[in-house]
Image (tube, rainbow, N blue to C red):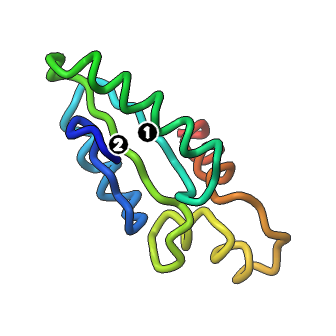
Amino acid sequence: MDSSWVDDYYAGDVFAAFEEAQNHRDALFLFYAPWDVDSQRAREAVEAAADAFEDHSGLYFAAVNCWAAEGECYREFGAGKQQEQGKPRESPIQKVTVHLLKK
């Protein structure tokens, strides 16, 4: 991520991102795959939003790479976890979104 206002968890440390978000009133997460064109477009939108709200200390912006094979996001919500459970492969980004919505 180019914006200094967005914390990029490139290694997929999703739980560290969740923990940091608890120190803020509101948080916006981008769960992405670095090679994915839609993720790249979404990144631009998140960076623009972070830049627009840079003076608002209650907001936290984070980007989590859910395609890093050794990362928590991939292992817990992505294809790595699904393969362990013998399930068909789904997008890790879809899995994280579903998990967050259930909270």
| Point 58% across, 45% down: residue | 39
According to the image, label 1 marks what residue? 29
In the rendered image, residue 50, in percent from the top left (x then y), is placed at: 30, 26
Would you call the spot at circle 1 few (<14 residues within 10 Å), some (14-19), or many (20 or more)? some
Q: Nearer the viewer, residue 90 or 36?
A: 36
Answer left or right for 10 relative to 93.
Answer: left
In the rendered image, residue 12, in percent from the top left (x then y), is placed at: 42, 64
According to the image, label 2 marks what residue? 62
Q: Nearer the viewer, residue 35 or 83?
A: 35
Residue 74 circle label: none
Dividing the picture into quadrants, the one containing residue 47 is top left
| Point 34% across, 57% down: residue | 9
| Point 19% across, 37% down: residue | 23
Would you call the spot at circle 2 few (<14 residues within 10 Å), some (14-19), or many (20 or more)? many
Q: Amino acid at mark 1?
A: Phe
Mark 1: secondary structure: strand
Earlier residue among tags 2 and 1: 1
